[in-house]
Amino acid sequence: MLAPIAGFTDSPYRRIARRHGAGLVVTELVSAEGIVRMNRKTRDLLGFSDEERPIAVQIFGNGPDIMADAAAVVEELGPDMIDINMGCPARRVCASGSGAALLLDPNKIRAVTESIVKKVRIPVTAKIRIGWDVDTLTYRDTVRALEDAGVSLIFVHGRTRAQQYGGRADWNVIREIVEMTAVPIVGNGDIRSFTDAHERMAFSGCPAVMIGRGAIGNPWIFSGRTPTSAEVITQIKEHLDMMIDAYGDWGIMLMRKHFVRYIHAFRGAKKIRKEIVVSNDRDEIHEILDSLISA
Ligand SMILES: Cc1cc2nc3c(=O)[nH]c(=O)nc-3n(C[C@H](O)[C@H](O)[C@H](O)COP(=O)(O)O)c2cc1C
């Protein structure tokens, strides 16, 4: 499954991940308050196409009422699931009691989740971390609260909030969670290859795993295939064209961070990287990319 990465796993990239075999994709976190007000930015974040299915829309917020209202609006858009963000470590998000801050309050987790489960007909999932910091590993209470509230599945990122994205994900804890609950658990954290994914599933007993950073610039991680240089170039060009379709010329700017991830392992990448991230011209970028294969 493709993990949500804000700013990267938008509709074009989710389609690419599905084409390469990702079993489920998730939108980046979308604010429940934003959804209820439904401004332009929120509408863009919530957009998806049928090709992305099955897709979960991820929402964040801090109260049972606002979250249930947002979930009802989201359900109308027709996603396959609604996911509750309980892992975002950002100060701005946690300060309002949302994201990873929920991990400190199992009663609130129960209330928020229950209100959403009651409000919508589609499955409700949650994406959690294992705790706030090493001294506050809250996963047992979190998982019990989610179970009580009736979630259909839990994504577990094996880090604490304090770790942010550093250190290592703790797959021993993920395995312990699989053993303590009947709710399906999808493990997440530090999967860098197709082989890693299968090793982590075997180790933890998770029926599926979720891949974030390891999938950026490498959608082949979902199939286990090693692409030829020509295939990589074709994929980048197609991705660029999908970005332009989705965002107009702004899509070229947004594509720059993806270029770097796709080409970092190529011979001659350094030189063309400089050219490619300053070009605003689709045809010129295609030519620069083609020069990589002949290099
Ligand atoms: C830049 C960035 C943005 C992220 N955005 C989200 C998000 O919107 N929602 C979410 O649940 N997790 C988000 N995550 C966390 C990832 O989904 C994932 O749990 C984490 O990166 C660990 O998995 P990985 O090692 O496979 O990347 C984000 C991570 C990064 C690095």
Image: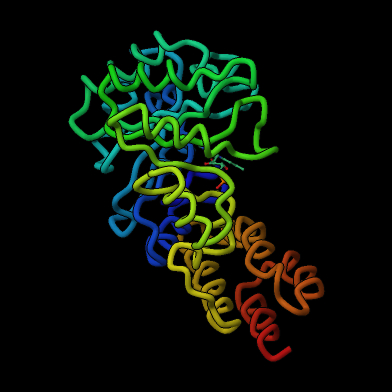
Q: Residue at x 18, y 30 (%)?
A: 121
Residue at the limit of the structure toward the left, as seen here: 121
Q: Residue at x 55, y 74 (%)?
A: 237
Q: Position of residue 219 (x, y in %)?
A: 50, 64
Image quadrant occupied by the C terminus: bottom right
Q: Position of residue 13 (x, y in %)?
A: 48, 58
Depth check, front residue: 136 or 294: 136
Report whether 286 appears left or right of 295.
left
Q: In the rendered view, tell whether residue 65 sits above or below residue 225.
A: above
Q: In the rendered view, tell whether residue 289 sits above or below residue 125.
A: below
Q: Residue at x 39, y 8 (%)?
A: 107
> How are the colours assigned in the image?
rainbow
Q: Position of residue 233 (x, y in %)?
A: 58, 78
Residue at the limit of the structure toward the top, as seen here: 107
> Residue 141 occupies which quadrant of the picture?
top left
Report whether 215 appears left or right of 277.
left
Q: In the rendered view, tell whether residue 40 sits above or below residue 35.
A: below
Depth check, front residue: 142 or 78: 142
> Residue 43 occupies which quadrant of the picture?
top left
Residue 226 in view (yes/no)? yes
Report whether 201 appears left or right of 65.
right
Total marks shown come to 0
Q: In the rendered view, tell whether residue 256 sits above or below residue 149.
A: below
Q: Position of residue 169 (x, y in %)?
A: 59, 39
> In the image, ligand 1 is in what quadrant?
top right
Q: Residue at x 29, y 50 (%)?
A: 54
Residue 39 in view (yes/no)? no
